[in-house]
Image: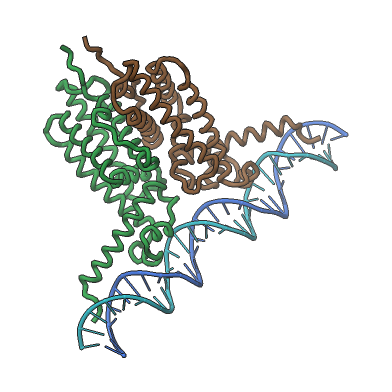
Chain colours: A brown, B green, C cyan, D blue
DNA sequence: TTTTATAATGAAAATATATTCATTCATTAA
DNA sequence: TTAATGAATGAATATATTTTCATTATAAAA
């Protein structure tokens, strides 16, 4: 006589989505400590009580978002395992990110969530995993760069240093996109990759 | 019969310095909300009560640090006013930052404090001023890039887009330096500026 | 119209953090 | 010794935030 299972499930999913998009926006910009449960609930257009029906603790919600971010990272890390040419891989990957920047705020939000996660003390297992993955991604990129250098596709130099600069620039772009949205311009591929890829072939 | 003015002043300055260095470390890494007064006092090796003898509120301390950051920004903004050649100015400025990165954490801390400041809601006048200054710096850099482009020193492209990427990469480096200190490597000048400066002069 | 299952609410309790303040400590010189 | 001064302490209080929970709202079908 009450609603069907289906209907209840839909309701729950609907409010979950509301909570998620409110929370990612706030956590990614202001960090865990600076965003209150009240803010999240208000942003989602629901009551505080309902928030706690879905998540026992504020931290649980944060951890869930962190887990999503880690999954995204895992997926992209796999792309780098491919046997495609390093230039092609880096260009494809970068282009995808730049497209994401252009489309909406989701990618920037997740990138910022990673930043925020790396500043938390006593990190949860979820956060520890995300931090580990992002460091792994860095090392994998360094290896890809080395490979590209041996093939003469990339400029010479310390591969780790280059990988680090690559991620720094992407993180910085995400930062600026979320804090200075009005002035932000998504850069062209060549701007992001020029430190890495030879442009003028000597005659 | 008690200590002299001088002596008291020295004592006050000594604890102020202790408070400053503890606070900048914590605020810059974790943000305003996530760092507690207790943490700051512990980091400084003093009691909570003494903290409040020096600053009426946690916010006052944050604002003081923000003011220092803004002063630093003002000073470097003036460098860009000079009539030196754009390449020279950018290279000098970048080199200085990279040197600072190598020396210690101070520059990265202040850079991060700027990031943190830009995420705060209801910003104090001090924070507003800092945010305004950092945006002004961005525009000034764009102008400098335009000038360099007209002189044929810089690659062609949207100057604002390039200025934005420049600051993004520096911000990102500061971020990575503070959150992944162990793996951080300060990049070479050429890596940071290659998106901007022509390297191979066509024969 | 009533019953039922679960979503949804928001005020109250629990907890954490910021701030205050009465007290103690340290040093100097009479 | 002791008086004087301001630094320094930390327990007590105020304030803010998180978490709980008794209560209400909603929609479907008997």
* Residue B124 x/y as whole percent: 35, 50
What residue is rendered at 33% in x and 59% in y? B19
Please, is residue B101 above or below residue D4 in the view? above
With B194 as the anchor, is A58 left or right in this view? right
The residue under the point 66% across, 35% down is A12
> Which x, y percent locates residue A124?
54, 44
Taking A48 as reference, is A191 left or right? left
Quadrant position of the C terminus of chain A in the picture = top left
Question: In the picture, which quadrant includes the N terminus of chain A?
Answer: top right
Which residue reaches farthest front? Answer: A150
- Of residue A68 and residue A98, the one placed in the foreground of this image is A68
Q: Is residue A166 left or right of residue A43?
A: left
Q: Is residue A107 above or below residue B30?
A: above
- Residue at 30% x, 26% y is B161
Question: Percent from the top left, x then y, of residue A72?
Answer: 51, 28
Residue at (36, 43) in percent of width and height: B178
Name the residue furthest left.
B83
B170 or A201, which is in the foreground? A201
């Amino acid at each position: 006589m009450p609603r069907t299972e289906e209907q209840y499930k839909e309701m729950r999913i609907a409010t979950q989505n509301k909570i998620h998009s409110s929370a990612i926006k706030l956590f990614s910009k202001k960090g865990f400590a600076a965003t209150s449960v009240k803010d999240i609930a208000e942003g989602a257009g629901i009551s505080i009580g309902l928030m706690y029906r879905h998540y026992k603790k504020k931290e649980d919600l944060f951890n869930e978002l962190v887990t999503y971010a880690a999954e995204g990272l895992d997926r992209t890390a796999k792309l780098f395992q491919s046997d495609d040419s390093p230039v092609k891989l880096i260009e494809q990957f970068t282009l995808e990110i730049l497209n994401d920047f252009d489309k909406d705020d989701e990618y920037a939000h997740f990138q910022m969530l990673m930043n925020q996660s790396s500043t938390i003390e006593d990190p949860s297992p979820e956060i520890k995993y995300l931090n580990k993955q992002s460091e792994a991604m860095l090392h994998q990129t360094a290896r890809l760069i080395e490979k590209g250098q041996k093939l003469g596709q990339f400029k010479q130099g310390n591969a780790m240093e280059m990988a680090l600069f690559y991620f720094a620039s992407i993180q910085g772009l995400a930062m600026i996109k979320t804090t200075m949205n009005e002035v932000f311009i998504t850069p062209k591929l060549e701007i992001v990759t020029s430190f890495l890829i030879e442009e003028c072939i000597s005659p």
